[in-house]
Amino acid sequence: MEAAWIAELRAVVGERGIVDDATRLFAYEADGIVLLRQRPDLVLLPRTTDEVSRALAILHRERIPIVARGAGTGLSGGATPVAGGVVLSLARMRDVLELDPVDRIARVQAGLVNIDLSLAAAKHGLFYAPDPSSQQACTLGGNVAENSGGPHCFRHGATTQHVLGLVLVLEDGTVLDLSEPRVDPLGLDLVGLFVGSEGMFGVATELTLKLTKKPATVETLLAIFESLDAACDAVSDLIRARHEPSAIEILDRLTIEAVEASVYAAGYPKTAEAVLLVDVEGSEVEVENSVRAIEPLIRARGAIEVRVAKSDYERKQLWAGRKGAFGAMGRIAPDLYVADVCVPRTKLREVVAHTTRIAREKNLKLATVFHAGDGNLHPNIAYDRRDADEVRRVLEAGDEIMHLCIAAGGSLTGEHGVGLEKLPAMEWLFTREDLATMCRVREAWDPDRRMNPGKLIPMRACLETKQALARPEHLT
Ligand SMILES: Cc1cc2nc3c(=O)[nH]c(=O)nc-3n(C[C@H](O)[C@H](O)[C@H](O)COP(=O)(O)OP(=O)(O)OC[C@H]3O[C@@H](n4cnc5c(N)ncnc54)[C@H](O)[C@@H]3O)c2cc1C
């Protein structure tokens, strides 16, 4: 017989808002990291903030862990379910609630797919600037939880710079409306604190987002290199010379091969060791001047050819190749380990070369594609998860790459978050005091740690904090 609390949840979200049969639950057992799997007991698909609030109040009473889920495109195991827990999917909450072209804001439900906001804003000459390569699928709520980036965040800034307000549901069902006032926030910046909290502070149900004016002109350059080092050096030169393209991306040889063999084929030359993809935007004159200045600079670093896209179609094709690159890697092997690390731009060349050495030593297929302007690397390893020894080498390489980036003054993640995957690595980067502070902030939002438990902050640090707080000498 069905437990009473499940019947209550069913009454809240309706028959279509609940998934409890094994076949359909299968679709929710992982995010983009398929190595990490856990079948949830139940999935809820509410449609409104009120339904989320009522569902969370029931789960609070029953002390059941909750994992919020957008589209499940995350690449750090953030949306991986927890044993005995419920997944709360925002997939049916995808309405544009308001779009104001004068204030240049949109109020949307958190399950709206990223690209759909730009499509809705296009008729007003506006767009939503943060553009993860997964933007055809990922949700804006997921972007907020991960503080997602994207190729054009080099110029426009990551998600946090575009979030003006949030409606949140806390773990006990309390609704917190942080969407007013829309002008400069007063008091503590709770919205800023929530962005990047990886589903551990509550569920975002409605978002107030900044829209950006579409540039009058955009040009896309494709620079072809005989070495990856030279492409990295060209990026440093561009920035040193104070050029401000809106995007600077690098794809290496294996990535090019994969893209060109796939449906995303963009016309990248298969013999190149690397290509640099640069977008320049602004007024017609600004763009013309920038292209004229950038081209010789890139050639001086050894580009054998610099192409400027001749049409909007060609531009779109060049970007479709970049944005489809992860998917295209299915051409190399059935599985892909997407590393996401960040280093100071000055260390790009050295770190990229070192990651190549790590992969070679471990006999792994490395395909690197990255947001070069931001120093945000994605050394991707194509592998087959049925080969246990290869999986072991992939995970070892992933750890070595993270250590390498920390040693270079970089970070564990540029945009994909910590989730489950990078949990142990948090202790490599942060001190006990750092982690203890994070635990205390987290517990202010979710005292029982039922929202996405076991992610982002190592449990050991949380337990230590709890013990320390229980000791009276801590207060003296
Ligand atoms: C092909 C591909 C390309 C990608 N490219 C990029 C890229 O360029 N830049 C980038 O930053 N990322 C990229 N990603 C990673 C991923 O798409 C982003 O992290 C994205 O923001 C996840 O959104 P989602 O809706 O799929 O969230 P999910 O994967 O479902 O969830 C991610 C995290 O957010 C939490 N969460 C989701 N919705 C909510 C909510 N409403 N309230 C509270 N917490 C919530 C979940 O609990 C989880 O911790 C890429 C992924 C793929 C597969």
Image (tube, rainbow, N blue to C red):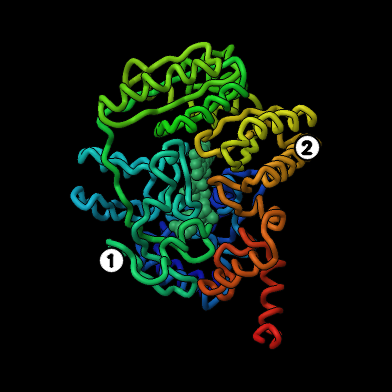
- In percent of width and height, residue 262 lies at 52, 21
Q: Percent from the top left, x then y, of residue 231?
A: 56, 23
| Disc 1 residue lies near ligand 1 with CB under 8 A | no
* Residue appearing at x 47%, y 44% in the figure: 149
- Residue 175, position in %: x, y? 38, 72
Give the side of residue 458 with respect to residue 146, left or right: right
Q: Are marks 1 and 2 in contact (CB under 8 Å)?
A: no
Q: Nearer the viewer, residue 224 or 240?
A: 240
Identify the element where label 2 is drawn: helix
The residue identified by callout 2 is 393
245 sits to left or right of 120: right
The label on residue 244 is none
Mark 1 or 2: the one toward you = 1
Give me the residue at 59% from left, 70% from top.
Answer: 449
> Residue sitting at 63 percent across and 62 percent down?
457
Measure the alpha-carbon separation of dots 1 and 2.
51 Å
Residue 447 placement: quadrant? bottom right
What SS does tag 1 mark? loop
Closer-to-camera residue (317/229): 229
In the rendered image, the residue lying farthest to the left is 102
Residue type at mark 2? Arg
Q: Which residue is mark 1?
A: 181
Q: Quadrant of residue 46?
A: bottom left
Quarter occupied by the N terminus: bottom right
